[in-house]
Structure formats: C-alpha cells, structure tokens
Amino acid sequence: MSATVRVWDLPTRVFHWSLVACIMGLVASSQIGGNAMAWHFRFGYAVASLLMFRLVWGVVGGRWSRFSSFIYSPASVLAYLQGERNPEHTTGHNPLGAVSVFAMLGFVVLQVASGLVSDDEIAAAGPLVRFASNTLVSNATFYHRQIGKLILLGLVALHLGAIVFYRLKKGENLVRPMINGDKEVVTQTSSSRDDVSSRLLALAIWLMCATLVVWAIRQMA
C-alpha cells in the first residue's frame, strides 16, 4: 500500500527551478555577448546567492533536503550499482542521484568562482580580476569558457537523460515531486517539514545570502 510523502519542501523546489532559470540565462547571455554580459554577471551573482542558501538549507532544511539524508559512502554507491536497494533510495536522492547532485553543485561553485576572475579582454571582466595575477586570470578564463561550461552542460544532459530513463524504463516521474513536493512511496517514511515557519526561515536565510553577495560585489567594485 503506497503513501504520500512530502519529499521536497517549497524552499528546495524554488531553489531548484531558480537555479535552472539562472543557468539557462547564463548560457544564453554568454552566447549573445555584448551588452548581454551585464545580465551574465547578474545571473552569476544570483547563482552565488542560491548556492550559499543551499549550503545552509542542506543543514537546517527539510528531512530529504538535508545533506545528511543523501551522503553515501563509496561502498553504498557500489552496492547500489550492483542492485542493492533500500527504502530511502526511493524517497529522496538515491546514491547515483546524490553523486549527481554533489557533482552539479561542486562544478557550479567552480564556474561561479572562475567567473569572478575571468576576463574576455573585450568588455567583460570579473570583479576579482584586479586582485589576481595574470596567470590566474588566464587559467580561470580558459577554464570558465572552455572547460567548466562544457562540464556543466554535460551534467545537465546526464540529468535530463536520467529523468527520461526513469520515466520510460521505470515508470517513475521525477519531475512531478519537484513541482508539487509530494511523492508516492511504498514504505511509509517521514516527510520533510514544509510549514509556514520553515518557509519564512528559508526566506530569511536567502535574503541574508543575497544581501551578503550584493555587499561583497560592491566592496569589490
């Protein structure tokens, strides 16, 4: 008998779709170039605030949004690949999904960090360029434009491929829970907290993160 569980709290869902929108904006603005680069930086700063929020929310957020719920050992990942399944794997992130999430977050952090010290030598330069050596700027720019972007696009493609695979091969819709927050599970398990107070807490955390990013950028100007 299945049960409905609140897996993804509203703050996590807003973070997810905001990050999707920002990444799309970053890719589009980088391809357009010119005056659109001003928006490229704005999207980058927005991503920085989102990442800061997610790091905090990964500690104090809902049950299944906390990093502690999907930090798996290498042995657990290997066992999952060999067919071992636990009830928690069908609720939150399974071991492979967890690897994907951490890889995505890690490379997004690297992309934002490298962008801060990148310089296209035309019209766009990161706010930290004037504090960095020419070698660091050159290496960061090369990584940001030639390596990091391709890695992130590859991870996005893998993510979309996994969604399609689970939908067609396993009959599991991974998108719906990230929209409405709920998931049908066979084994009863605890739901993520997602009430008014937790949502207000998330809003306060994000506002503090966004304020910190704005303050830091102004200090660099």
Image (cartoon, helix red, strand yellow):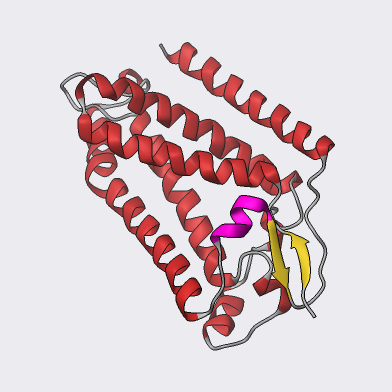
Q: What stretch of residues is rendered in magenta?
A: 175-181
Q: Position of residue 152 (x, y in %)?
A: 36, 51
Task: Tell whether 215 sits left or right of 128.
Answer: right
The image quarter in which residue 205 lies: top right
Q: Is residue 177 magenta?
A: yes
Is residue 13 in view from this perspective? yes
Q: Viewer-proximal residue, 68 or 220?
A: 68
Tell me what residue is drawn at x 58 percent, y 36 percent: 52
The image quarter in which residue 165 lies: bottom left
Q: Is residue 200 magenta?
A: no
Compared with 53, 97 (above or below) is below
Tell me what residue is drawn at x 58 percent, y 84 percent: 79
Q: Position of residue 179 (x, y in %)?
A: 60, 51
Quarter in which the C terminus is drawn: top left
Quarter in which the N terminus is drawn: bottom right
Which secondary structure type mostly characterizes the magenta part of the structure?
helix
Compared with 56, 67 (above or below) is below
